């Protein structure tokens, strides 16, 4: 056997496999229809490929699933978690959890680009964390972890010259992710300047969309994790009655059982794994934290603008911070209140009137699971807002977007009562 034949035997199968894969990715065939079990697993998986993808989300949200946008609090899956309650009591909806540690408004905005059709005239829940609103705004590394070229391509394919799109393009260009693909970066610069994309740009997007969508269809259901087992386990711990007295009793019992090794009302495992041995050095450590001025306010406006565009009826939830932890670390209560007031002003002034404000409840026993995340009784309080919102027909929302919320004036506004009243 000559050397060329031996070489072909070695690399031939690799080349053949690559050609077959390329043909599959360029094929117009839709490769995926996910089973109901895959939807169940994906809905609670918090898997990055699901968040960044399109196929599973679109299929699930076209049915009984409702998007629950948030960040790390969604992973606190105790038995009172929204996904557990919906399954146990056979609610007419199932939460599809979209977000994890590090997801903020800009990430959520781009994630919505793959499901805009499924959000039209539908309902959604959006949990806002005051910790997002730090002076530097979204962290580039966290944004990069959840960045999806597929989402950006979907967005660019339907781009129009609006303040929302110009701002979104500029924000993406401020992230390393926005420069990870030369062609995409070039298009983003055009959009940021209000210039139209060329026919060649649109051809590039069409080819990219075909390849990326097939990648998503082939690989998005890979390794969806074991969170569904947590949900199934939680279902068994709930009472037969979904009366709030019964749920609150269960939540109190579980909270009491799980917060025995510290005086801060923090779950034992979190305290042991994250705080034990470091508590002394954290005393007063958050005294200078300030969430009142941040680019995040304008990133949040992108989310609101997107909801208005799809006529999505949204319940916004403002969670509290563990009061005992806040006092210990010196976190300024007045600053937190002003932050929440600024967020509520941005919501109410534009017609977003469904707001569940739990920001004052961080001192209630067993309301928080750890330092900043909702826990047992906190999730019961969330359900008191979510359950009627989902069950009852809501008046069609009337949104009126104010593009001044994209301005640095708003980002840097000191939210005194007078300043909020005077901002137009």
Image (cartoon, rainbow, N blue to C red):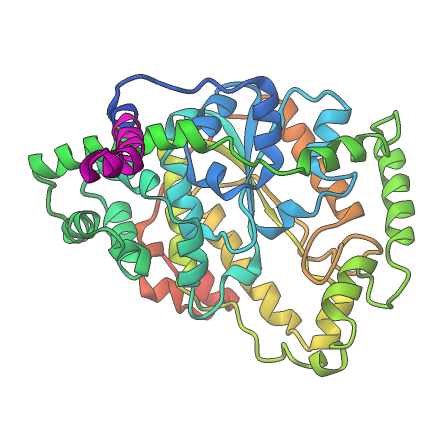
Viewer-proximal residue, 347 or 134?
Answer: 134
**Quadrant (top left, top right, bottom left, bottom right) of the N terminus:** top left
In the picture, residue 394 is in which quadrant?
Answer: top right
User: In the image, is residue 3 part of the stretch drawn in magenta?
Assistant: yes
In the picture, residue 79 is in which quadrant?
Answer: top right
Residue 179 screen position, x and y as percent: 25, 56
Residue 248 screen position, x and y as percent: 86, 41
Residue 177 screen position, x and y as percent: 32, 55
Viewer-proximal residue, 272 or 187?
Answer: 272
92 w.r.t. 208: above or below: above
Viewer-proximal residue, 46 or 367?
Answer: 46
Q: Is residue 267 visible?
A: no
Residue 329 screen position, x and y as percent: 70, 76
Q: Is residue 20 visible?
A: yes
**Quadrant (top left, top right, bottom left, bottom right) of the C terminus:** bottom left
In the picture, residue 155 is in which quadrant?
Answer: top left
> Residue lying farthest left?
199
- How many marks the image carries: the answer is 0
Viewer-proximal residue, 119 or 391?
Answer: 119
Instruction: Give the residue displayed 53% in from the left and 18% down from the top.
Output: 63
398 w.r.t. 316: above or below: above
């Amino acid at each position: 056997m000559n050397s060329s034949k031996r070489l072909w035997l070695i690399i031939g199968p690799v080349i053949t496999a690559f050609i077959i894969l390329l043909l599959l990715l360029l094929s117009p065939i839709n490769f995926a229809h996910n089973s109901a079990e895959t939807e169940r697993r994906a809905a609670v998986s918090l898997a990055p490929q699901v968040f960044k993808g399109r196929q599973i989300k679109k299929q699930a949200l076209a049915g009984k699933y409702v998007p629950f946008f948030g960040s790390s609090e969604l992973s606190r899956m105790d038995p009172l978690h929204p996904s557990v309650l919906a399954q146990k009591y056979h609610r007419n909806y199932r939460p599809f959890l979209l977000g994890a540690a590090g997801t903020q408004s800009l990430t959520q905005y781009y994630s919505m680009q793959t499901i805009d059709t499924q959000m039209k005239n539908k309902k959604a829940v959006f949990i806002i964390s005051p910790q997002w609103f730090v002076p530097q705004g979204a962290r580039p590394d966290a944004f990069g972890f959840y960045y999806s070229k597929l989402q950006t391509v979907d967005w660019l394919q339907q781009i129009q010259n609006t303040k929302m799109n110009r701002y979104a393009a500029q924000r993406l260009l401020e992230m390393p992710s926005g420069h990870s693909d030369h062609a995409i970066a070039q298009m983003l610069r055009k959009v940021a300047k209000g210039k139209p994309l060329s026919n060649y740009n649109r051809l590039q997007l069409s080819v990219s969309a075909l390849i990326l969508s097939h990648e998503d269809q082939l690989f998005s259901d890979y390794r969806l994790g074991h969170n569904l087992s947590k949900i199934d386990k939680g279902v068994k711990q709930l009472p037969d009655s979904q009366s709030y007295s019964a749920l609150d009793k269960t939540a109190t019992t579980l909270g009491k059982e799980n917060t025995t090794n510290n005086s801060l009302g923090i779950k034992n495992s979190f305290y042991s794994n994250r705080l034990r041995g470091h508590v002394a050095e954290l005393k007063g450590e958050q005294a200078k934290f300030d969430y009142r001025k941040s680019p995040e306010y304008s990133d949040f406006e992108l989310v609101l603008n997107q909801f208005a565009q799809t006529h999505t009826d949204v319940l916004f939830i403002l969670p509290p911070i563990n009061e005992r932890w806040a006092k210990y670390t010196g976190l300024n209560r007045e600053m937190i209140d002003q932050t929440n007031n600024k967020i509520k002003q941005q919501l109410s002034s534009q017609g977003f009137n469904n707001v569940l404000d739990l920001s004052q409840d961080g001192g209630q026993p067993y309301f928080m699971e750890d330092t900043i995340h909702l826990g047992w009784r906190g999730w019961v309080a969330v359900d008191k807002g979510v359950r009627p919102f989902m069950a009852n027909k809501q008046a069609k929302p009337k949104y009126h977007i104010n593009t001044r919320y994209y301005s640095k004036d708003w980002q840097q506004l000191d939210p005194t009562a007078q300043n909020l009243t005077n901002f137009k």
